[in-house]
Image (cartoon, rainbow, N blue to C red):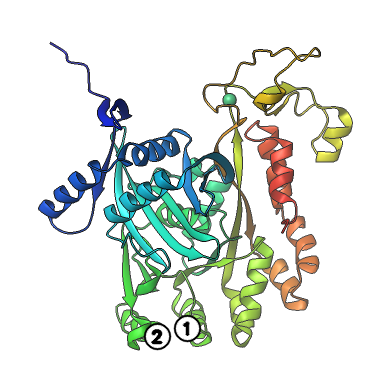
Amino acid sequence: MIRKKKSTTAVTSGGTQVVLPNLNFKPQVGDKQQQQGLLIACRGMEQYPASVMLAAQAFKARADQILMDFSQQGVAVRFRVDGMWENMPPMDRVTGDGVLVIYKRLCGMNPTDRRSRQSGRVVVTYKGDDWFFDIMSQGVPTGERVVIRIEPKKPVLKALSDLGMREKMQEQLRALLNTESGLFLFSGPASHGLPTTWRVGLESADRFVRDFHSIEDEQLGDPELINIAKHTYNSSAGETAMDVLKSLLLKQPDVLIFPDFVDAEIVKLICEEIIEESRYSISRIVAGSAIEAWIRLIATYRGSAKELVKCTCGVINQRLIRRLCTDCRQPFQPSPQLLKKLGIPAGRVQTLYQPVIPPPPDQRVDANGKPIEIEICVKCEGRGYYGRAAIFELLIINDDIRKAVLNKPSPENVLPVARQHGFLTMQEEGVLAVATGLTSLQELQRVLSPKKS
Ligand SMILES: [Zn+2]
């Protein structure tokens, strides 16, 4: 007999039966027995159903962050979905306080301390998958602020194509990463998925033919990467990256990875190793464009500017954009003027797509004020977008581009030369993503417009 899988849990809350979604907390603190005791204690609390419901709602909405703002009036709740904050129904203080006590206890944090900055982690199982709930709480003038970051325990994005990189660029990037000697830079603005591209990019390099070593501060806490030997040093205990690098160099490594170049001495030695010993190095930097990243690196380590220019073979930069929901995106025929503005040759693209975003519930009425039924897309729940992808610009550096940057290290000077050699800017790459229906023009404009404060 096939028994139907139990998908819900019924609990009694305030005298009424509440059916809870199948979601389990797995505390990481203490031994098995302590963890069991902790779970029993939390389940016994009146607000336990609310703590499960909040987490389940976040999963259902595909949120990667939950924000709870505790003030005298109540608890404001927001979810971050595909990088956009959405307001959720607020909680009253009794419920919100109870939920927070449960979360804090599950993470081994002190529930009675509402002032100090605290952080902790609990694993949450939802629909068979394990997720990390990283909770950070901090007292603020109006009360307390809590941020919960939700991350899959097993990385979901594995290949460059998963990130949205077009095929030709994947080939170019792999070729650059597999060059025998040189320096490659990963770059992107803050909170635009740079750590993910860093991980997936490094894992797409050929780590079976050459040996890869990364050198990083213990406190950085970067995740382990497959087939890359990680060497850490503890800067607060007086250990230095240089000590680690010098002992590593005795073993003749092929590829040296620095999530952060640390200082000028390291950069000088790395340049020497690349030029004289044909080694390869990879680093990353926060910057708004590929050219900006390269110029920033050169300006930061001025003493090795010439060597850095000589060594660098490529720089990649990225932005995250929301993917149009493929179930409800609406095709339209772009006018010749629009195509011209976008730089798309006439006849190349027949159809572009735009999101369908229904009006808010209070505006769903006809001309006479009579409520009308509007069908809301089941997949994206009326957001018009579902998930995110990255758009990339890849600067492949040759001697002409090197000459331009040595002549005058400014984007205005380097960009025209790079373009002559086939470099496409983020804007142009974005237009390609629009032309293929991956995203909309509105979204591209939102992402590329200068940051509003
Ligand atoms: Zn949709």
Residue plotted at (79% across, 36% down): 344
- Image coordinates for residue 49, horizontal then vertical, percent: 32, 36
Which residue type does callout 2 highlight?
Answer: Met
Residue plotted at (60% across, 82% down): 301
Kindly tell me whether residue 208 is visible in this rendering: no
User: Is label 2 in contact with label 1 (beta carbons under 8 Å)?
Assistant: yes
Which residue type does callout 1 highlight?
Answer: Ile
Task: Report the residue that reaches farthest toward the left.
Answer: 33
- Image coordinates for residue 329, horizontal then vertical, percent: 64, 25
In this figure, which residue is indicated by the disc labeled 1?
Answer: 266
Dividing the image into 4 quarters, which one contains the N terminus? Answer: top left
In this figure, which residue is indicated by the disc labeled 2?
Answer: 242
Kindly tell me whether residue 59 is visible in this rendering: yes
Callout 2: helix, strand or loop? helix
Callout 1: helix, strand or loop? helix
Write down the quadrant of residue 374 in the picture. Answer: top right
Q: Earlier in the sequence, mark 2 or mark 1?
A: 2
Q: Is residue 120 above or below residue 376?
A: below
Relative horizontal placement of residue 148, taking residue 79 as reference (left or right): left
Q: Which of the pair 173/378 is nearer the observer?
A: 378
Q: Is residue 419 above or below residue 360?
A: below
- Give how far apart the Cα atoms at labels 2 and 1 are: 6 Å
Write down the quadrant of residue 398 in the picture. Answer: bottom right
Ligand 1 contact, mark 2 (Cβ < 8 Å): no
Dividing the image into 4 quarters, which one contains the C terminus? Answer: bottom right
Residue plotted at (73% across, 60% down): 418
